[in-house]
Image (spheres, grey):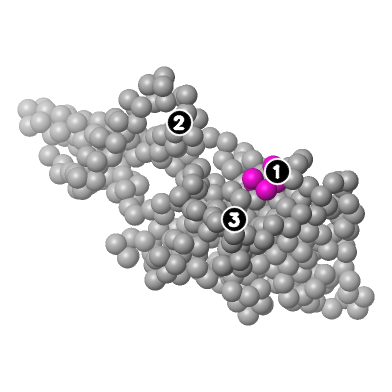
Amino acid sequence: MAEKSTAPSAIDDILAEYAGLELQLSDPALHNDPGAARKVGKRFAELGPIMATYNKLTSARDDLAAAEELAADDSSFAAEVPALKEQVEELDKQLTDLLAPRDPHDADDVVLEVKSGEGGEESALFAADLARMYIRYAERHGWKVEVLGVTYSDLDGYKEATFSIKSKEPTRDGVWSRLKFEGGVHRVQRVPVTESQGRIHTSAAGVLVYPEPDEVEEVQIDEKDLRVDVYRSSGKGGQGVNTTDSAVRLTHLPTGLVVTCQNERSQLQNKIRAMQVLAARLQALAEEQADADAAAGRASQIRTVDRSERIRTYNFPENRIADHRIGFKAHNLDSVLDGNLDDLLDALGTADRASRLAAE
């Protein structure tokens, strides 16, 4: 009979938690609290793939045990045993992978910032290209993108832009699980539109990604630590789009963090949204500082937007993209910039899981 190789304590804890979540979801009172309902539904969705694989494994083990027992009296059942053993081994491997250590934020939504850096106007244009790449990727996955604020360059590039990206339904592998690898300096090699001699230039733009959990109330922000600036929302080329000073810029004086929001219709709404984003950033910062040794990846997303600190290079003349962290290379840059990032992010995810297993 096949032996159970999956750690029983781990799966027993999951079974108990899943049963408890089912009871909570069936309680009508839960739905009177949308925040709590989303939190429970989110965790229930996270455990769904584990439960589905566990149930398949349990069924396959039962089938294998029955076939082995019957084979003792009827040799015709013996032919089924090898295939069932192989199925049990594969499902057990899948369950072990699902139970492996995970980033606790994988199911979270994110706030993503793109900033121009070294390279002047060309860097701002490249920052806009990166922003469009992430927006298209989000659209392909059915995620919701909210523009929180954009500062345009003279040629309609992005000096800086901030986006909130959310999944429409709770899921085990949320937005953070995919986009968390994007934080860092991105380098581009191409002929800028401002180059009259056709020479290839190298410039850089920075990307910062951090989780935007459902609840950030645990982060306390003292109003005395804030500088609040209000100004008129602007469109491309600096053109004013509002006739009132509705845009809000928050500066957190102790940390120097700056958050802007101009997407909402009123100054009050923009301030509320900016406070939510600031709380999420402060929470991410606190977590990075608390486990700096284990979270070197997130903590070092952007130190300076300098070409020498790149995580990835986008080479337009060769239509090539190269991620320097894992040695990934592909000659489909045009497709990647159109939002086809899955092959690259799959490779980064595989490397991340291998690293977590090695550190266990």
Label 3 residue SS? helix
Task: Say which quarter of the image contains residue 130.
Answer: bottom right
Q: Earlier in the sequence, mark 2 or mark 1?
A: 2
Amino acid type at circle 2 is Ala
Q: Residues within 10 Å of mark 2 (few under 14, many from 20)?
A: some
Residue at the far top: name it.
Answer: 28
Any part of residue 43 in sight: yes
Amino acid type at circle 3 is Glu
Q: Which residue is mark 3?
A: 223
Image spot of residue 48 (x, y percent): 38, 35
Q: Which mark is residue 268?
A: 1
Residue appearing at x 50%, y 53% in the figure: 220
Residue at the far front: name it.
Answer: 224
Q: Which residue is mark 2?
A: 37
Residue appearing at x 45%, y 31% in the figure: 37
354 or 48, nearer to the observer: 48
Q: CA distance from mark 2 to mark 3?
A: 30 Å
Q: CA distance from mark 1 to mark 3?
A: 15 Å
Give the label, 1 or 3, closer to the camera: 3
Stretch of the chain drawn in magenta: 268-273
Label 2 residue SS? helix
Residue appearing at x 88%, y 52% in the figure: 240
Image spot of residue 307 (x, y percent): 67, 77
198 or 164, nearer to the observer: 164
Q: How many marks?
A: 3
Q: Earlier in the sequence, mark 2 or mark 3?
A: 2
Q: CA distance from mark 2 to mark 1?
A: 27 Å
- Residue 270 within the magenta-colored segment of the rendering: yes
